[in-house]
Amino acid sequence: MIRKAVLPVAGFGTRCLPASKAIPKEMITIVDRPVIQYVVEEAIAAGIRDIVFVTSSNKGAIENHFDTHAELEASLEAKGKHDLLASLRSMVPEDVNIISIRQGEPLGLGHAILCARPIIGDEPFAVLLPDVLVDNSDTPRSDLAGMLEAYDQHATAQLMVEEVDWAQVEKYGIVAPAGEAPAPSSSADLVGMVEKPPRDQAPSNLAVIGRYALPGAIFPILEKTPPGAGGEIQLTDAIESLREQQGVQAYRMRGTTYDCGQPLGYLEATLAYACRHPELGGDFKALLARYHLGA
Ligand code: G1P
């Protein structure tokens, strides 16, 4: 069972400027909590117990967010604000560890994952890219939990994929399944994958959405992976080498994704999450109606 996850949070967040100038883009709020909190909640709900942030110098707010704030807690206690206090205290359950390690230079996603090697060791682990929110509120179970189970069942690396518009393939890692595309909540062997291909060279429109289950064997491969697309050490290139050595599968998700690494994506996530928020949803829908937007 995979218990460790790496969340690379070192990037500048250029697509979110100016919002991400002095705060990390991962701290942008969706309704009542930062994007990163949803991703950490997703990992914990799927059984992850060690969460490794790969950070950089201006990302201290992320570490602070998941740390105890003794002064604030004492103040809430003194004022009798027990619900708020409980919500802060339950953010990181007692059996969950939040660990962080630095990526000194921005050399790419593959390099960021390699930075977590001293903590992960040789064990299999999950990777969650915190730009992407996976919403499983309408599905019977979490896609991440399903993918981690598939890793155990098949003893093979898993890449979570969803179908995207063909016009979008050049924004993603794209996989080539060996036969038919996998059915939702199941896996299929891959015969290749390529990072951000032009539309006419894409082997499918199944895009890697930023959730991976990988063996420790990826680390020695990452160490030898030369810079690829954009001059960066690409996780996709290392996974392609892993596939040649021991096979890799695509796991087809069922939920909905929101790309919170860009403004329209986090606006859409805000809309979707606000409408179904237990306390704010009703009033938010009334607001939408007032602005003649329906709900
Ligand atoms: C990264 C990965 C890419 C993946 C994408 C998902 O790209 O390299 O394979 O499809 O995340 O969001 P980035 O968006 O960081 O350029």
Image: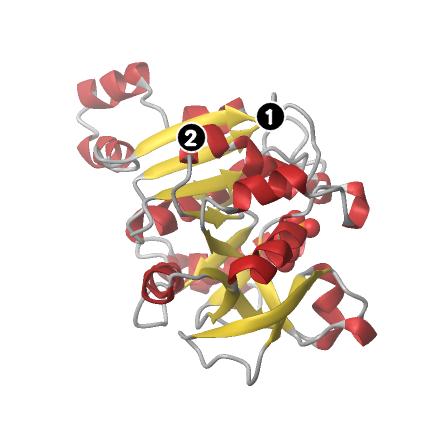
Let me know if residue 268 appears in the view.
Answer: no
Farthest residue, direction top: 71
Depth check, mark 1 against mark 2: the one in front is 2
Instruction: Report which quarter residue 24 is drawn in.
Output: top right
Look at the image and tell me whether residue 95 can be seen: yes
Q: Amino acid at mark 2?
A: Ile
Residue 119 is situated, as x and y percent measured from the top left of the image, at 42, 30
The image quadrant that residue 50 belongs to is top left
> Height in image: 45 above or below 289?
above
Q: Which residue is mark 2?
A: 119
Closer to the chain start, of discs 1 and 2, is: 1
Are the residues tagged 1 and 2 within 8 Å (C-beta)? no
Name the kind of residue labelled 1 in the image. Ser
Residue 144: x percent and y percent?
39, 59
Nearer to us in this view, 236 or 123: 123
Identify the residue at horizontal 60%, vertical 27% (top origin).
103
Above-or-below relation of 12 to 156? above
Front residue of 177 and 99: 177
**Residue 79: percent from left, percent from top:** 21, 22
Give percent across and percent down for residue 54: 53, 32
Q: Mark 1 highlights which residue?
A: 56
Q: Residue at x 64, y 26 (%)?
A: 22
The secondary element bearing badge 2 is classed as helix
- Name the quadrant containing residue 227: top right
Name the side, left or right, on which 12 lies relative to 161: right
Give the vertical position of 192 relative to 117 (above or below). Answer: below
